């Protein structure tokens, strides 16, 4: 009859050591799992994620803010494609007379010219609404065309580079003017060799004086 052989003490020790190692590994795995679980619930990784990648809400807010900034930006003014407004010093206004000396029965014909001395065409109002003829003798203003002017009109023209335009002449009847003598008799201007000066202006751009004599 056979008898069962019992394991030696060395075998028991090895088995116990293996069991102990397994228990340690199991306990370590449980501790790591619990630590990971509590760490995930603490919110720190979530905060890092939130700082690293924008949420849908923050993205929407950023988009809304960006849209508002774009709407607040003014639309650029389109660059003009036509000629610019005429202006000094390229624009030169000159007083014009049909003579420099007038006999007692001759009435001076007054006119003006506007020259564009610039290198490009320009646009300007040259109508009677912006024309002023002034005749003076020394410091004494004798006659101004805007005194009692009727039916002033605008006339917009384009003046080419190096070109000029001339206004139709008007007649001065050799009399004084003032705002309070409209429709009434006016005093005659002094003749007998008296010297006068004509200055014209268009849109505030004045000419040099042109001198003439009334005999």
Image (cartoon, grey):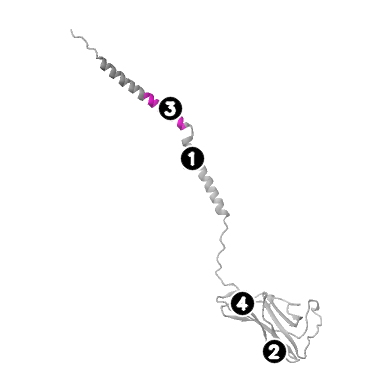
Left or right of 182 on screen, residue 77: left
Q: Quadrant of residue 158?
A: bottom right
| Residue that numbered label 1 is attached to | 50
Q: Where is residue 97 drawn, in percent x and y?
A: 68, 86
Q: Position of residue 77 (x, y in %)?
A: 57, 63
Q: Position of residue 81 (x, y in %)?
A: 54, 69
> Mark 2 or 4 closer to N-term?
4
Which of the labelled discs sits on residue 91, or is there none? 4
Q: Which residues are magenta?
A: 26-40
Number of marks drawn: 4
How far is mark 2 from mark 1, CA to CA? 91 Å
**Which residue lies at the image location 58% right of the left edge and 74% below the top edge?**
122
Q: Is 136 inside the magenta-drawn segment?
A: no
User: Residue 70 placed where, x, y %?
Assistant: 55, 53
Check contact, mark 2 vs mark 1: CB within 8 A.
no
Q: Residue at x 41, y 28 (%)?
A: 33
**Marks 4 and 1, how far apart at CA:** 67 Å
Callout 4: SS: strand
Q: Residues within 10 Å of mark 4 (few under 14, many from 20)?
A: some
Q: Residues within 10 Å of mark 2 (few under 14, many from 20)?
A: some
Q: Nearer the viewer, residue 129 or 99?
A: 99
Of all residues, the one furthest to the left in this rendering is 1
Residue named by callout 3: 34
């Amino acid at each position: 009859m056979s008898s069962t052989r019992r394991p030696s003490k060395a075998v028991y020790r090895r088995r116990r050591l293996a069991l102990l190692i397994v228990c340690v590994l199991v306990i370590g795995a449980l501790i790591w799992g619990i630590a990971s679980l509590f760490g995930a619930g603490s919110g720190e990784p979530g905060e890092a994620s939130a700082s690293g990648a924008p949420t849908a809400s923050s993205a929407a807010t950023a988009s809304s803010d960006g849209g508002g900034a774009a709407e607040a930006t003014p639309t650029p003014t389109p660059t003009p494609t036509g000629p610019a407004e005429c202006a000094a010093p390229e624009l030169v206004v000159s007083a014009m007379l049909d003579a420099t000396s007038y006999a007692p029965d001759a009435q001076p014909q007054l006119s003006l010219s506007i020259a564009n001395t610039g290198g490009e065409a320009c646009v300007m109002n040259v109508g009677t609404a912006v024309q002023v003829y002034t005749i003076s003798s020394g410091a004494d203003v004798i006659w101004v065309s805007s005194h009692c002017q009727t039916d002033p009109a605008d006339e917009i023209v384009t003046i080419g580079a190096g070109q000029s335009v001339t206004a139709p002449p008007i007649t001065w009847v050799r009399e004084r003017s003032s705002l309070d003598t409209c429709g009434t008799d006016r005093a005659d201007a002094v003749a007998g060799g008296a010297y006068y000066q004509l200055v014209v202006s268009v849109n505030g751009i004045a000419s040099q004086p042109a001198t003439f004599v009334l005999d």
